[in-house]
Image: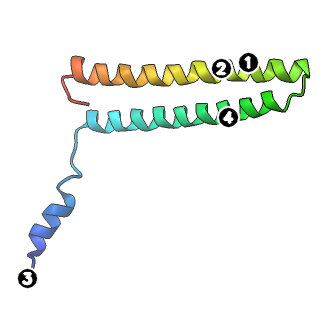
Amino acid sequence: MATDANSLLGKVTGGVQGTFLDWLSGVINIAVGLAALVCVGILIYSGYMYITAAGDEGKVSTATKSLTYAIVGLVICFIAVILVRFVLSTILGQGA
C-alpha cells in the first residue's frame, strides 16, 4: 500500500489556503475568545474579593465595581461575536 508523494503533499497543504476574510474572522474570534476568558477570570477574582471583604466598605465597593465591569465586558464580547458573524454573513456574503 504505497502512497504517492504528490498525493500526500496535496492532502497536507490542501487546507492551508484561505482568503483574507477567513483569516480576519479567525483572528477576531480568537481575540474575542481571549477577552471573554479574561472577563471570566476577573469575575472569579472579583467574587473572591467580595467574599473575603469581611464587611470592609472599600473592599466591597472595589469588588462590586470589578464585578460590574467584568459583566459589561462579557456582554460586549458576546455582542462582538454576534456582530462579526452578522457582518461576515450578511454584508460580505460569507458563511461564518
Q: Secondary structure at mark 1?
A: helix
Give residue 44's mark.
4
- Spatial CA span between label 4 and label 2: 13 Å
Q: Which of the two discs, 3 and 1, labels the residue nearer the N terminus?
A: 3
Towards the viewer: 78 or 8: 78
**How much space separates mark 2 and mark 3, taking CA atoms?**
60 Å
Q: Residue at x 52, y 20 (%)?
A: 75
Q: Quadrant of residue 58?
A: top right
Is 23 left or right of 47, judged from the image as shown?
Answer: left
The residue beneath circle 3 is: 1
Residue ID for mark 2: 69
Count residues near mark 1 (Cα–Cα under 10 Å), then give few for <14, some for 14-19, many for 20+: few
- Assign a secondary structure to mark 2: helix
Q: For numbered disc 4, what is the local secondary structure?
A: helix
Q: Left or right: where does residue 74 sit relative to residue 58?
A: left
Per the image, the residue denoted by label 1 is: 65
- Which comes before the other along the chain, label 4 or label 1? 4
Measured from the top left, where is residue 87 in percent x and y? 29, 19
In the rendered image of this protein, does residue 29 appear above or below residue 5? above
Q: Position of residue 5 (x, y in %)?
A: 12, 74
Nearest to the observer: residue 29 or residue 20 = 29
In the displayed structure image, the side of residue 81 where residue 72 appears, left or right: right
Residue type at tag 3 = Met
Label 4 vs 2, first from the N-terminus: 4
Give the CA separation, mark 3 to mark 4. 55 Å
